[in-house]
Image: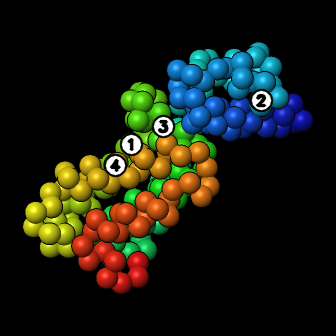
Amino acid sequence: MARQDRAVRTRAALIETAAGEFARHGYAGAALSRISRAAGASTGALTFHFDSKGDLAAAVVEQAVTAGRTVVEEAMTGHATPLRQLTAVVLGLAEKAEDDIAVRCAVRLEREALAEAESWREVWWPVVGRLAEDACRLGELPTTASPSGVVGLAALFIRSIGIHHGPGTGAAHLARLWLMTQPGAAAGPL
């Protein structure tokens, strides 16, 4: 049992370390040797757990997907109107990207159009699209707003937080900017 526990801890350390490496250096700049060394694991241990750099990136993104789903679910149940849900999704994902290295990594890999990050985009993109359509249809946004424009703006906000490297680097600022772009969104507390 001790061997299995050690393997689980090693795998978790490799994923956590890889998330930081990918978030800082991108997919192309990430080095497996740095990841294994920083995780305190041998290169053999890394290749035992992951067949390739892509498999390791996919494991990091999988963690981000789990975190992102939680944010989206909370935003959808905690707010009454589509615009408030949309705002909660965007700001929640921005905050999560600031606090969670796996999410920050997924944001970076998605910006790089890495195939392993497609599942990250699928966590939020369809939800944001549906909420933007609903908010426009219900008149929560100006008639000049288009659902695709709102989705593009939301994507810009979600993706831009990942450019920063840690807590206190932008989520609060982005929240203020997002609320300024949403007429009526700041009319009352979320």
- Which residue, given by chain and number where applicable, does mark 4 sit on? 155
> Which three-letter amino acid code belongs to the residue tagged 1?
Arg
**Distance in Å between CA atoms under marks 4 and 1:** 9 Å
**Label 3 Cα neighbours within 10 Å, binned few <14 / some 14-19 / many ≥20:** many
Give the residue number, with chain letter if any, for mark 2: 38
Image marks 3 and 4: residues in contact by CB distance under 8 Å: no
What residue would you read off at disc 1? 121
Image quadrant in which you'd find residue 179 = bottom left
Q: Is residue 133 visible?
A: yes
As measured in the structure, the alpha-carbon distance from the residue carrying label 3 to the one carrying label 4 is 12 Å
| For residue 118, side relative to residue 83 (left or right) | right
| Mark carried by residue 108 | 3
* Relative image position of residue 17 (x, y in whole percent): 69, 34
Please say if 164 is above or below 38. below
Q: CA distance from mark 1 to mark 3?
A: 11 Å
Please indicate whether residue 30 sits to the left or right of residue 44 in the image: left
Query: Who comes first in sequence, dot 1 or dot 3?
Result: 3
Which residue type carries mark 4? Ala
